[in-house]
Each structure stands twice: as C-alpha cells, then as structure tokens.
Image: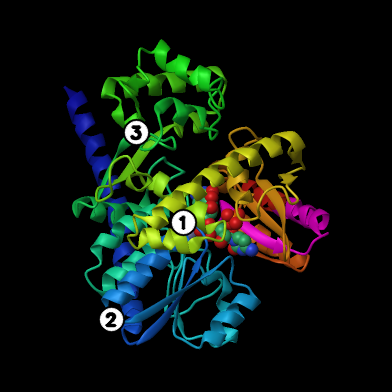
Amino acid sequence: LMQPLLHFRTTRKLYFLVRRLIDVDLAKYKEMLRKAYEVALMLKKQEEVLVVTHVDADGITSGSIALQALERAGIEGNILFVKQLDPSTIEQVADRNVFTWFTDLGSGQLDLIAEKKIECVITDHHVPQGHYRLQLNPNDFGVDGAHELGGAPTTYLVAKSMGLNYDLVSLAIVGAVGDLQDSRHGKLIGLNRLVLQEGVEGNFISAFRDLRLFGKQTRPVYKMLEYTFDPYLPGISGNEKAALELLESLGISPKDGEFWRRWIDLSYEEKVALTSELVKLCMEAGYPVSTIKRLVGETYIMLHEEEGTELRDAMEYSTLLNATARYGHEDVGLKVCLGDRGEALRRARTLLQNHRRNLSEGLKLVDEIGIVELDNIQYFHAEDKILDTIVGIVAGMCFSKANLRKPIIAFANNSEGVKVSARATQRLVEMGVHLANALRIAAEKVGGKGGGHSIAAGALIPAGCEKEFLRELDRIIGGQLAKCRS
Ligand code: C5P
Ligand code: C5P
Ligand code: ZN
C-alpha cells in the first residue's frame, strides 16, 4: 500500500528538483536577456560597426549572426577575422576607428581593449578578465561558457534583441556544436538548451537521439565507419573491407541499386542494430564508459537545409566551417553562413576533404612521435608537422587513445613562436583542473599569453621556452588537483 505513495513522494521531490533547476536557468536567461537588450540598444545607435571575430566555426557563425543582425537593422557592418586578440591585432582594430562588436573573443583581453580606448560591445563566452558594462558573457551570470552557452548563442541573444532575428538560431546552434559545447553529455545543456528549444519551437531545428558520428548525411555508411577516428572503432577505422563486412554481417545492404546508402537512408531497425554492434565492439576493446557513451547522443538537424548535404547536420556544418577558417579561408565559410549555396559551398567542400586528411595525418603523426607523460600532464610537440590552428582539435581527438587522467598539451610552431593547445576531460575539470587559468599563468611566466576555458585552452609562447613552460604547467596543474583534494 505504501509503495505507490512513496513513489509519488519521490516523483514529487524529483519534480520540484527539476523545476528548481529549470527556474534557475530561466532566471539567468532573463538576466542575460536584459543585458543583451542593453548591448543591442548601443549597437542600434551606430551607423557603422566593425565585427571582430574568431577564426573557427563558433567565430564564423557568431560573426555572421552579428553581420546579418546589423544589416537588417540598417547598420553598415564589416567583418575582421583574427586568430587571437593580441597587441598587434588590437592595434589593427583600433586603427579602423569604428565602433566595434567583438564576438566569440574579447573578454579575455579587456585590458588591451581598454588601453586602446576602443568603443565596443562584446558577446563572448571565454573566461572574462574583468567587468565591462557592454559585455555579454555567460560566465558573468554564473553560466559556464564552455558547456552552457557558446559564443554564437551568446551573440544570437543580442541579435534577437535587435529585431526579429529568430531564424539566426540555426547558426547559433551550429556554432555551439562547433565548439563541442554538447560534448559533456552528448547533448546541449544549460542555456544552450533554451536557445535550442527556441529553434525547435520555431521549426528551424529538429533534435533527436542518434549515433554521433561524422558524415551521417553525406557519406556512404561504410565510408562513415571507415573514416571515424574519434573514437577509433576497433578493427573498423581505416579499414574499408572490415567496414563493409560489418554491414553485411548485420544484414545491412550497403547499396540500394546503384546508390551507396548513407546513414540517413537506413531503416530504424538497421540503425539500432549497427549502433548496438559499435557499442559492443568498443566495450569488448575495453574502452572507457565515457568514450562509449559518446557514440550516441543528440543530433541537430537544420530543417531549412537540403537533406544529404553537410549543412543539414550541425556537426557536419560546423566541421565544414572549421575546414575553411582554420586554413585562412574564413571568407568562404562566412559566405556559406550568409546563404551562398553555389561557389562558396563547393569550395568549402574541397577544403573539408583537405581538413579531414590533415586531421587523420595529425593523429598518425602523434602515434609515431608518441605522447610524453609528466607527473600531472602529458604532451607532444608537432613542430611544423601539424598546423597550429588544428593542433588543438588533434589533441582533443587523442583522448580516445591517450591517458584520460592527465590533461593533454600540444605544441606546434607558427610564425610568431610556439602555439600551445591544451585539452582536459570533464572528470579532470571536476577534479579541479582549470586549463585557462593554468595556461595563462604558465605562459606569462615565459613571456607568452594564454586563456580559453577550463576544459580547453591555448597559448602562444616564445620558441625555445617549451621545457620551462611544461615545468610550470605541470606544477600548476598539480597544485589545482591538490587544492581540490584538500
Ligand atoms: O575559442 P573557442 O571557445 O571557440 O574554442 C573552443 C575550442 O575548445 C574548440 O575547438 C573545442 O575543440 C574546444 N572545446 C572542447 N570541449 C569543450 C568546449 C570546447 O574541447 N567542452
Ligand atoms: O586553439 P585552440 O583550439 O587550442 O584553443 C582553445 C581555446 O583557447 C580557445 O577557446 C581559444 O580561444 C583559447 N586560446 C586563447 N589564447 C591563445 C590560444 C587559444 O585564449 N593564445
Ligand atoms: Zn567559441
């Protein structure tokens, strides 16, 4: 007799707990919207605005949201892409002498911006280095900028306050996925989810649980499997024959007449069978539960894009954008975001092939040179063999094989010195690791600069300082872990 009552009590408790969480998020969302409105008002007073943004998927989508919002408000907008905001790029911005809208960057460089007296607004999600009245940054509202609200969704909040820009929600979600904001739970959480909900309600986006591999829209299923390296599918990755045999063993025909079947062409039963088999293979290979869990999660479909194209799926769309921006062709990605489905999309697709090849060669290189373990961190130095702009992506991908108990640090040379990229796991962050803080301090110690998020950060340091930098960083990360333990 008591059982249903007990059950009722627990459900009620759970209900109120969930309600409270939602209320907290809603309260923060409303607070952010108030600030977004203030930022939007300032923008609407301008005749001309220079958008300064980051060269990655989140940066391109943020920039294109900003540009479209300005254009629709009758304000002249121009865009400048930068790899990072350092004294020389700030100088460049200051020289333009135009009201500036920093998107997906700026919060970490408030001192430089103030020094040059640049009139501006900022919509960013990086750990802020101080307060600024016209800065919209989730971290200022107790919202984690690495998982709960990305740069593009933050920018979208201002765009929404400038006018009826609800359609730009698709770009906001592509940007969030591009920054791996959905990586922790295999789905978007926090305020990202509230933005997503607007997209779903507005019929711009559809969200559902699905396999989370790259190429579900565009690749024959066997190629999708063969080309998956994150995570490495045991016996299948890099092996076309094995991928085809796997499909046959499950009774899944790889072809439909003349056409190679893509994931989206499979029936529900076939999708379930293949997913279960992949999970089984990874379990048998002894993969950590966290890696196996990542195989399945939410997929975000852009309902206004053509089925079977990269642009239909947020994961493929954002990779396509990274493939342009990280190679100095951000103009191509920008045109795609602004609606060019002809020449720009064709060029982006060629760049995507090149990007995928570079990532897989990067992973191979790390296999060859090996990852060196120190007390609290592990690292590899790619020298000139991996481009500085993608070495962070490669580092993140290495986690499917490397030691999960230590942050991974990657070095690559660039024209200004040595680029550092660092990636941690969620577990390490929970244990006290904060890469942005650690990299900032260690970089400054050797005359460089760093920042980012707790789980992913970067720095630029002078060449030849790697050893000293590593020593510092190893010590700082050790300190972060010890502090959390005590
Ligand atoms: O500068 P920005 O925030 O755009 O850079 C985000 C980078 O951090 C992405 O390239 C992504 O690889 C990484 N990241 C991550 N895990 C997260 C959030 C971001 O690896 N949870
Ligand atoms: O370049 P990478 O993807 O490794 O960058 C990871 C994070 O670190 C990004 O959020 C980026 O904005 C930040 N970063 C930084 N300062 C640098 C390099 C990267 O704040 N010099
Ligand atoms: Zn970002």
Name which quarter of the figure residue 170 lies in. bottom left
What is the CA distance from the residue labelled 2 to the residue labelled 1?
Answer: 26 Å
Name which residue type carries label 3.
Answer: Asp
Residue 131 x/y as whole percent:
50, 76
Q: Does the residue labelled 1 lie within 8 Å of ligand 1?
A: yes
Q: Residue at x 66, y 48 (%)?
A: 481
Say which residue label 1 marks.
Answer: 57
Per the rendering, the mark at residue 74 is 2
Left or right, residue 239 beside residue 164: right
Name which residue type carries label 1.
Answer: Ala
Residue 249 x/y as whole percent:
42, 11
Q: Residue at x 34, y 33 (%)?
A: 210
Name which residue type carries label 2.
Answer: Gly
Say which residue label 3 marks.
Answer: 210
Left or right, residue 30 beside residue 394: left
Q: Nearer the viewer, residue 14 or 401?
A: 401
Q: Which of 321 and 259 is in front in this view?
A: 259
Tell me, yes or no, whether the highlighted magenta stretch contains residue 475.
yes
Point out the tag, 2 or 1, that comes first from the N-terminus.
1
Q: Residue at x 76, y 53 (%)?
A: 475
Per the rendering, the mark at residue 109 is none
In this picture, is 355 found above or below 105? above
Stretch in magenta: 452-476
Query: For the residue carrying disc 1, how many other residues have a C-alpha within 10 Å: few (<14), some (14-19), or many (20+)?
Result: many
Which mark is in front, 3 or 1? 1
